[in-house]
Image (cartoon, helix red, strand yellow):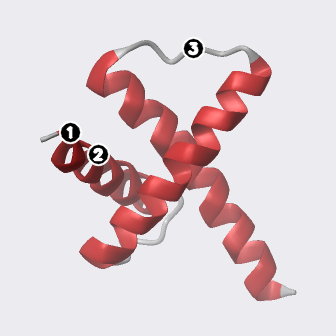
Amino acid sequence: MEFVWFLLVGLIAGWLASVLVGGGGMGVVGDIIVGIIGAFLGGWLFGKLGISAGGGMLGSIITATVGAIILIFLLRLVRRA
């Protein structure tokens, strides 16, 4: 059951990130992948900066969304280069 929540957080975070940066979504699989990688990136970054987004599902979604936004910006920089 945890795996389903993990995928759900990844989907929500990836979709939110793509909407917030103006991408409009990358499809279900793309949003999940960006959200999951963003969760790892956001968790690592928040840990290094000593920031806590809170616990539970909402904190996980916030952390993953911030990481996914950073990931999308980095991907767009690489595509332009």
Residue that appears at 47% across and 63% down? 34
Dividing the picture into quarters, in which one does residue 54 lie?
top left
Disc 2 to disc 1: CB gap under 8 Å: yes
Between disc 1 and disc 3, whose residue precedes?
A: 1
Q: Position of residue 69 (x, y in %)?
A: 57, 53
Q: Position of residue 12 (x, y in %)?
A: 29, 50
The residue beneath circle 2 is 6
Residue that appears at 54% across and 51% down? 38
- Give the residue type at disc 3: Ser
- Give the residue type at disc 2: Phe
Residue 20, can we see it? no
Instruction: Please state which of the two labelled residues, at mark 2 or mark 3, is closer to the viewer.
Output: 2
Report the Cα–Cα distance between label 2 and label 1. 6 Å
Between disc 2 and disc 3, whose residue precedes?
A: 2
The residue beneath circle 3 is 52
Circle 2 — which element? helix
Residue that appears at 77% across and 21% down? 49
The residue beneath circle 1 is 2
Q: Residues within 10 Å of mark 1 (few under 14, many from 20)?
A: few
